[in-house]
Amino acid sequence: MPIVCENLGRRFEDVAAVESVSFRVEQGEFFALLGPNGAGKTTTVHMLTTMLKPSHGEASIAGFDVRRQAHEVRSVIGMVFQEPALDDRLTARENLQIHAALYGIPGRRVKERIEQALEWGQLANEARRMVRTFSGGMKRRLELARALMHDPQFLFLDEPTIGLDPQGRRHLWESIAALRGRGLTVFMTTHYLPEAEACDRVGIIDAGKLVALGTPAELKTSTTGSTESTLEDVFIELTGHQLRDEEATPRDRLLNFARQGGEHTR
Amino acid sequence: MIATGEPLPRVNRSMFAPRVIWVMWRRELVRYGRNRSQIFGGLSRTVLWLLILGFGLGASLRQIEGYSYAQYILPGVVTLNVLFASLQSAIALVWDRQVGLLREVQVSPAPMLSVALGKLLGGATIAVAQGSIPFLFIPIIGVPFSVTKLLLAWAVMFSMGVFLTAFGVVLASRMRTFEGFGSISNGVIQPLYFLSGSIFPIRGIIGGVGFLDIPEELRNELARLGVYAIGGGWVVQLPVWIRVLVFANPVSYQLDLLRFVLLDFRQLPMVVDLLVITILPVIAALVAAVAMAKRS
Ligand SMILES: Nc1ncnc2c1ncn2[C@@H]1O[C@H](COP(=O)(O)OP(=O)(O)OP(=O)(O)O)[C@@H](O)[C@H]1O
Ligand SMILES: [Mg+2]
């Protein structure tokens, strides 16, 4: 059973972060949600992964309703958030140990799973290092390996390559691409068009509305009338040239504060 | 997917997952162990309050109900360390939610009640450790001490730690952003500390050497009212509004019990103390679990 959402929407007080989106993602498919800043990508992913309650509409994953069967949904998905969700005062291995406990990986399998994850993320030699000493790319690899540790059927990635250098980006993308053909369904959001180009299908979201949906080739022909164009042309065509200025959210303010050195509560 | 070998079994869904409680508890302790500045903070607070204020103010105050001022504030300084440790653990949740592990926990199938319990037990354990720092100075201030007293004090401190961490968790879950521990320290910790009878007595007799002794009849009269005069001196008369605030502060009762354990001296009804120490942490823990599980 795939990912299905029907008129899914979410409001924050008076702003509609996601107005109403409907789409399906089939089993084993790689799906990319594209959109400018503030388009509602994160909000959509958070509703699908039970992190946010939808204001209206329905969504289900593998047949489980994201509202009423949150526990079932959570057991079959793996998630990488836009901002790292690691404990950076713990080592890579300690972070993975917590993950194993949260997902109830049986005790005798934990060690093997952790070694495999570290191996897969090419972090075997850094397992005992505190995560706060990791580069952005290493953190991403760790998070991706962690999200796969419990054999999810669905993988959600919210801008997985943001903030990475071209090498890190390529490496991460190759790791994701290597998961193809194993029955894993991947739902990712991105700003970065070459990544979307490599996905089976792409949805373009702007101001909380899905403005296009199809394979990259379909989108090119239907929007610009030429298969020679790039997804970037399609993207600009559909979402306009206007810059998206956003007010700093509380999280942005906190992140800025963290970057400036933070506080002793960290 | 990246793994080889047989597939993993399905996650079961019970509210109570000892392993989740264990890893969350351990996480708090590992973080504490790696944070030398917290231990240093506890030590410097103890020196400031217990030694400098204790002996400094003690020089002019002489005695409170027969106890030296440093002895009198010992339970208060323990409480201050418990307050700081609990609220620091709890407020770390604001970070945790935005840039840390909490979202990883929320998106997992782990039961939030167990996650919250691990967090609270961890916070309380750290509070007991931090709150024990003043005990190192007991030989200097001269209070009779024993293993039984230590264990009883730890029990009271642990309950206090669970309650205060839970209280802080509820507070943290209402904070969208966080730009400094100062507001928590000034707005929460200090009022709770000052208004708990920690540094001044709620009632009793202050004075001692140099004061006129209280006549025997008056002493008996006072004893009937629950005021036990050991030395002689002034009867404490707090303004009504301060009394009201002190009585409304749950920390007053926890501290009162702690003082009873450490000094054998109590200013509030024992029954209330015991009720506060046993019931409040349980209620607060449940409220905290709900607050932590809440999805926006
Ligand atoms: N918790 C919140 N409270 C109020 N408004 C919010 C909240 N979360 C998101 N929004 C608003 O909803 C809109 C969509 O936000 P969202 O984070 O989903 O965008 P996004 O496409 O992920 O953007 P980005 O590319 O910057 O990550 C934005 O206008 C944002 O300000
Ligand atoms: Mg986003």
Image (tube, coloured by chain):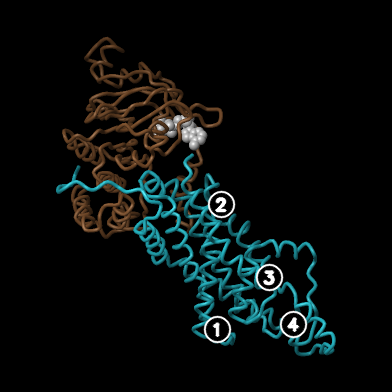
Chain colours: A brown, B cyan
Both on one chain, marks 1 and 4?
Answer: yes
What amino acid is at disc 1? Ile
Q: Where is residue A200 shown, x and y percent of the image?
A: 23, 25
Q: Earlier in the sequence, mark 2 or mark 4?
A: 2
What amino acid is at disc 3? Gly
Q: Earlier in the sequence, mark 1 or mark 4?
A: 1
What amino acid is at disc 2? Leu
Residue carrying label 3: B197
Label 3: how many residues lie within 10 Å, few (<14), some (14-19) or many (20+)?
A: many
Q: Secondary structure at mark 2?
A: helix
In space, the residues marked 1 and 4 are separated at their CA atoms by: 24 Å
In space, the residues marked 1 and 3 are separated at their CA atoms by: 20 Å
Q: Secondary structure at mark 4?
A: loop
When the figure is inspected, residue A200 is found, relative to residue A255, above or below; the finding is: above
Viewer-side label of 1, 4? 4
In the image, A84: left or right of A154? right
Q: How many labels sit on residues?
A: 4
Chain at tag 2:
B
Label 1: how many residues lie within 10 Å, few (<14), some (14-19) or many (20+)?
A: some
| Quadrant position of ligand 1 | top left
Residue carrying label 4: B228
Q: Quadrant where the N terminus of chain A lies?
A: top left
Chain at tag 4:
B
Q: Where is residue B102 shown, x and y percent of the image?
A: 41, 49
